[in-house]
Amino acid sequence: MTDTTEKTGTAGMTGTAGAPGTDPATGAMGEAVAAGVSGEAVTAGVSGEAVAVERLLEAVRQGRVAEVPGLLKPLDAAARKTVLGELKLLRTEVRGWDWSRWSEAAGIRRTLRVAGAGCHTGAAAAAAWIAGRDLMDWGSRDGSLLLTVLADRDPAWLADVTQRLAERPAVVENGYALVHDLVVLSGCPVPATDAYVTGWTRAVAGDGLLDRLRTDPQTPVLVPRFFELGETPDPLTWWNDSDNSGHWPTALAALAAEGLLDRETLLEGCVARLLRGGRPRDLRFPLSLLQLLGPTGRERSGRVAEWTGMAADAPSPVAGYAQQILAELALEGELSVRELAEMSGPVLFRTEKKLVRAQLTLLTKVLRKDPAAAAELLPVVADAFGHEDNGLQERALKLVGRHLGAVDEQVRLELAGAAARLDPGHREAAEELFGGLPDEDADGAYEEILPPVPVARPVAPPAESVAELVEDLVALSKGRTRTAEEFERALDGLVRHAHRDRAVLTEAVAAAFAGSFWLGHHQAGRRTNYFDHSTHGIDVVLAALLGAVDQSVVQAGRARRHGTTSCTHLAFGGVIDARLWEVADLITTGRLPFLLAAPTWHTGAVAPLELADRLRAYQEAGVEPAPADLAQALLRLRKADPGAREAAARGAALGSRAGERLADWLESDASLAPGVRFLTRRQETATGRWWLADRLVLRIRERRAVREEFPPAFQWLGGRLSEGLRRCVHWTDGQANWAAVLPDDRETLAAWLLPSLAGGAAWAERGVNRGLTALAEGDGPVGPAVRLALAIGLGARHAEDRLTAVDVLLVLAARGELDGPGLGAELARLVSEGEVKANRLAEACRTAAATGAYATVWSVLAGVLPGLLAVEKPVRALGEVLAVAAECAERCGAAQEIPGLDAVAARRGSSQLVVQAKRLHRALAGRG
């Protein structure tokens, strides 16, 4: 947008603020001399103007915002230019104040915003000033004052400012009323920007919506923009009840019926928005409006391509609506056989059983009315042969069988070839129907498909230049990087550069973090202690480097006992904090040349030979290892590394205690993993603990090496013998970085992950399984804790979390470390106690099996089923688990007896439980 007022400097002002013919360079003095006014009078005028300027600036400094319009009004362009310069300086000063002056700064910012708006002459500059994030008041208290100081401006200038403000979401979100009033004041067209549309929806939303929309002249302009937004504004989704007077779709449908909104525009907008796709919440509004509008026959038949696209790719609710419209058209004869075939194929490939079932029902009705359509429709029906649901495969096969006689030999062969996608349980029926099936696999041998075993990736060396290091530090401090690998690389780089040239590093860090909150001071000059309760990540090290935190605070933080056995977040976080306090204490000395615990691989593990070399370098330089750094380095040692034995010998040869600890640690095979058990149901009832996390008991084993030589922050790993419940009030955030504390001991890591996993599962948190990935990539033995953690993960509430657990399951299988029966027994116990829902387990197992790992999944389910089949009251959704088990058994050729299966398979009935039990029984009996 071109700012037409910047060049002249006063074109946006009228009246006293910019009188015609006034030269800003000479101001009032020049005009007075030209008019022959005496020098004394001129001096008095200038003096009076200076007083007015000072009064305005004083009001601004004192936060007296209500007085600003009156004090600003008599000032001319030159005076306002002078004031603007002072306002900019004051704004910069206030930005540097710390939180102790927050209240004072808030009042000054309000007055700065109003005064600056009245002093700027360019539209772009005025809009930028008004929209400044540091000046905006979180509300609309100052809107009337801003209008007052802008009221005498040229309408074209005001329109320019209005349009610029309307394009800024932060302004409109918190000050829609201001922008709207500027639209009215300037008489400009309604700015239909994304931000303005969203702000308008918030302003008019609520009870009585229809009346407000009916009387608002902006409604016809802004409503069509709803369908072009990237995200549906929140107010459009606040009410789902069509009887509510604040329900947007109902109100818009009523306006369309009254003719105040164009019906065709709304229909076209809804269809286009639904076709574009997106999150379910963003599609709920256009779908609801479309349903209320109720497309008529011509409106439906003229959009067949659009309905077909929705049925194929849209989320289930949208696809279901489109499918319903197409079904009505097909049964009314408005949809050709070719169009029906084109829309049926994609629908039959969808995973939603309800949609596939409805499509097969539609095809059944059409074929009953028009048998001649079989040649074109049956090959489409055969697409359902590959559906994951066994019942839908059977239904499609029966439909093909009923109309097979109406097709020629070529179509028959095509259908027989498609039947190869059927589950083995349906092969016999298909062979009987077609008189045999093509043999696609001559040897018939089953081959298990598993993912490749992950390879540890070397960590990139620390930043070579200070500039590159500072970039890493800024990203880490601002939270833009979160992985343990990035954290460790930046921390090691910080230590290395402080050792090489601390002055250069300090200068660069000071420049990059000049505006950081921890650099602030009290008015009295006393330093604010921002690190009393938290390190704020790597910020505590940066603050120590710059001298922004008292040494006494650092010493106190380093001496604090961080570790605890009652909360895994405090335990793992305490280890990280202890290392940060230690580095913060030593960073100003530059004593450490590098960190001993810097990882070799992305998992956090350290190569034994590399640590031996680091200890030798320390010894040659006369540097004593930092306690927390050495402790973390030992925990990260990869004991299974081929160089472990040689590293132990090198460590012992050093003759130092650190070298001896390296050798002892590598030669010890004792695990730090605590024992894991649950309270029984009787104990659970007696204690009133109902959640899985509340019943989890970890028995910490005493480890002398940990108790005597590890810093306090690490002693929860085995410093003393104890057993107890693990209580934690934290969310699951942070799990991803815990793995780097114990990358070589998966069993110990899993045991300490369990309370967090169990708590996250109980509260249905998202991202609860992030920490599980380390169990697949790490080293060390796999035991009961890993199995239990994986079992809880497979039953997670959210699909993306279950997918993470499935990945871990498959990688463990690929590494030959999966105990399928043991995992199955854990799952059976969790399902029978109601801690894991059977349908979620079935979904996770189905996902794993679909990758080609049928034998792996069968090994797990073979351990699950005996426990679930033995329960007196049938487990809900057990039929789904049996369906996955049956498919796996059919695919991989399993042949083993499942206790309790015969009894269920012998029952009468057509429930999924009985049907799938019979299917599994047949599959196992056929291989026996």
Image (cartoon, rainbow, N blue to C red):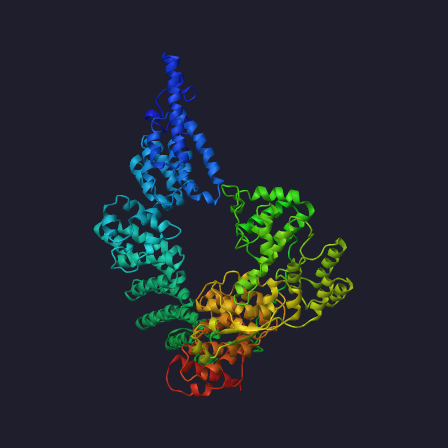
From the top left corner, tell me how far across and down residue 494 is, in percent.
Answer: 63, 50
Q: Is residue 460 shown above or below 375? A: above
Q: Is residue 625 shown above or below 440? A: above
In the picture, measured across the screen, residue 432 lies left or right of residue 216, that is right
From the top left corner, tell me how far across and down residue 368 is, in percent.
Answer: 32, 73
> In which quadrant of the rendered image does the N terminus lie?
top left
Q: Is residue 381 shown above or below 498? A: below
From the top left corner, tell me how far across and down residue 473 is, in percent.
Answer: 58, 49
Q: Find residue 649 and report its image quarter.
A: bottom right
Residue 742 in sight:
no
In the picture, measured across the screen, residue 410 lies left or right of residue 718, that is left
In the picture, measured across the screen, residue 10 lies left or right of residue 623, that is left
Residue at (55, 50) in percent of width and height? 477
Q: Is residue 643 shown above or below 822? A: above
Q: Nearer the viewer, residue 435 or 844?
A: 844
Residue 28 in sight:
yes
Q: Nearer the viewer, residue 653 or 18?
A: 653
From the top left corner, tell me how far across and down residue 90 is, in percent.
Answer: 46, 35
